[in-house]
Amino acid sequence: MKKKQGKYLEHFTAGIHQYRQMMHEAFEGVLNEGISRYPVFVFHRQEVTVGIPVVDRENVSGDWSVNVSTLEEFYIKGLVKMEQVEEVKRRINATPGQYCCLVLADTEGGFVFLNRSDEEE
């Protein structure tokens, strides 16, 4: 998957530290509840119809609302192709493991992978 470079990605990575605890808890929750082995975060500023809301940007100091979804939901809804599924699985299970994030801002969007073990990006 290619990372589409844009200002929204710079803005996203600059403020990601404040979402780290939520991401850890949501990721572990999806795994521990047996929902999926492949959680995917959707960072957005508009309404989306994928995943379950975990952060509303109106209620936090950050600029992003966040939903947690799964790779399976992304595939079923046609957001990823079969060849992308294997790459996402590999990166989530890598050492160190990574969070898979779909970042949506206005008309731009792209996948970003963040190391789960890093406290700062």
Image (tube, grey):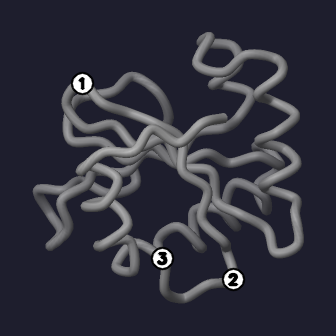
Picture disc at residue 117? 2
- Residue 78 visible, this angle: yes
Q: Earlier in the sequence, mark 2 or mark 3?
A: 3
Q: Position of residue 43 (x, y in %)?
A: 37, 47
| SS class, disc 1 | loop
* Left or right: where 23 falls relative to 39: left
At 69% across and 83% down in the image, what residue appears? 117
Sort mark 2 into few (<14), some (14-19) or many (20+) by Cα contacts within 10 Å: few
| SS class, disc 2 | loop
Residue to which mark 1 is pinned: 107
Sort mark 3 into few (<14), some (14-19) or many (20+) by Cα contacts within 10 Å: some
Under mark 3, the amino acid is Arg
Mark nearest the camera among 1 and 2 is 1
Task: Find out whether the residues at labels 2 and 3 contact each other: C-beta distance under 8 Å.
Answer: no
Q: Quadrant of the N terminus?
A: top right
Q: Position of residue 30 (x, y in %)?
A: 69, 54
At 25% across and 55% down in the image, what residue appears? 64
Residue to which mark 3 is pinned: 20
* Left or right: where 24 falls relative to 62: right
Q: Position of residue 49 (x, y in %)?
A: 39, 22
